[in-house]
Image (spheres, helix red, strand yellow):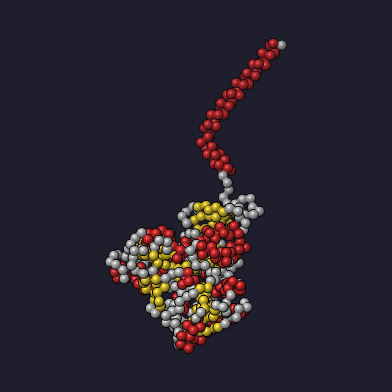
Amino acid sequence: MPQERESKGSSAGLAIVLTILLLAGGGVALWRLAPSFLPNLLHRTNAAAAPAAPEVILSLHGSNTIGAQLAGTLAEAFLKREGAQAVTTKPGARADEYSLVATLPGDTLPKAIEIQAHGSATAFTDMVAGKCEIGMASRPVKPEEAATLTKLGDMTSAECEHVVGLDGLAIIVNKSNPVSALTKDQVAKIFSGEITNWKDAGGGAGPIEVLARDDKSGTYDTFKALVLGKAKLVAGAVRIEDSRELSDRVADNANAIGFIGLPYIRSAKAIAISEPGVAPLLPNRLTVGTEDYLLSRRLFFYVAAQPKPLVRRFVEFALGSDGQDVVARNGFVELNVKAGSAAAATNSTPGYMKLITGAQRLSLNFRFRPGSTELDNRALVDLDRVSGFLANPAHQHGGIILCGFADAQGKGDVNQTLALSRANAVAEEFKRRGVTPSAVSAFGATNPVASNKTEDGRQKNRRVEVWMRTM
């Protein structure tokens, strides 16, 4: 029996020795293989531990003016309207890219609304490429851009083009600059390099330093269309992508001048702009709201004619009263209707002055598609906004007054007829909504708000003003 235990012990010892040798050999093999498989193993481990990226449920690409802040606050308010309890902002891969992240009711994983704000031109290229559902633009879509998007619908139609707010393209200078007003022609000459010293623009002696937005910016596109025309930006202009940076640099430089969206005036000084025959106007909420200010502009959302339900809900929210309150809080001019006092032009006709005496001006004008009496896309929505405003008991009134105007092209009697036709077209739309105007009048080509020598100016002059009689 002792011999048997000794034999078993020897066998066990041999097994232990063999196991140790095998493990040692395996360890050497594993050590040699480690450089190839350990990084992959660690990568798979880390990937499994990292949280999944939130699913992007909505993407908005385009205008920096809209995307830098407004789009984000609209997205946050919308997510909370949808039931999100908390919304966080996550930076994107590049500057001017970010996402609003939240967990919606019924979901276990967070969802994201993605915003990329690299300029209005990218709104349409990214829609073509299927990279976004909403294109943000601080100018209207160009015909060649609309032609690339026909598979999504007619981008100029009321189904695809939505005015989400208004902005004034402010010309800004340093607060110490004595210049308080310029003609649009002077602005064009400064930015094209024809005027290079402030003494030639009504200021003190000193070289003018021009700052401008970058080529992809809708702000720059609007400036080219409204001010420069066929002229080229001066070669020495400092180009800046971010609106806030441009404004702050003008505010810090006594010789600087720039152009910027209304919310980005910040510490700089806005100056009044005029044209021949038109009084200088500063950009403010009334002059921009009525679009009478020469450098006012619309801010757009573009979507497919048949968008997915979430896109439709987001756009409806942005255009509604709560969304427009968000627009106002971001420094833009909202489309919610307001009534207030307004000074009539000094060259107003006696008949016009008699009609509006004691009345309040509503914060909008109705405008039309070029060359027609057909209301444009903003006007179609504004009809309902005004009707809702008048139906509110808090806005007791003695009736509304519609004043039609035309441009100065053609004969006076023809312009008078066109102005009255436009006023009557608006009146008929109000009657369909249960509102009968107390007065509908036309004043032809009088009281121009812009030059009749340009198509943009003539388009501004073809309008219907809305006034409200007080009780």
The residue under the point 58% across, 43% down is 48
Q: Is residue 189 left or right of residue 330?
A: left
Q: Where is the N terminus found, in terms of image quarters?
A: top right
Q: Is residue 125 left or right of residue 267?
A: right
Residue situated in front as seen by the camera: 436 or 380 = 436
* Residue with the most extreme right position: 1
Q: Where is the C terminus found, in terms of image quarters?
A: bottom right
* Residue with the most extreme left position: 205
The residue under the point 59% across, 71% down is 394
Q: Is residue 235 visible from the viewing direction of this image?
A: no
* Residue with the most extreme top position: 2
Q: Is residue 172 visible from the viewing direction of this image?
A: yes
The residue under the point 68% across, 14% down is 5
Percent x, y for residue 44?
57, 42
Percent x, y for residue 363?
51, 73
Residue situated in front as seen by the camera: 450 or 312 = 450
Q: Quadrant of residue 468?
A: bottom right
Q: Is residue 173 above or below residue 13?
A: below
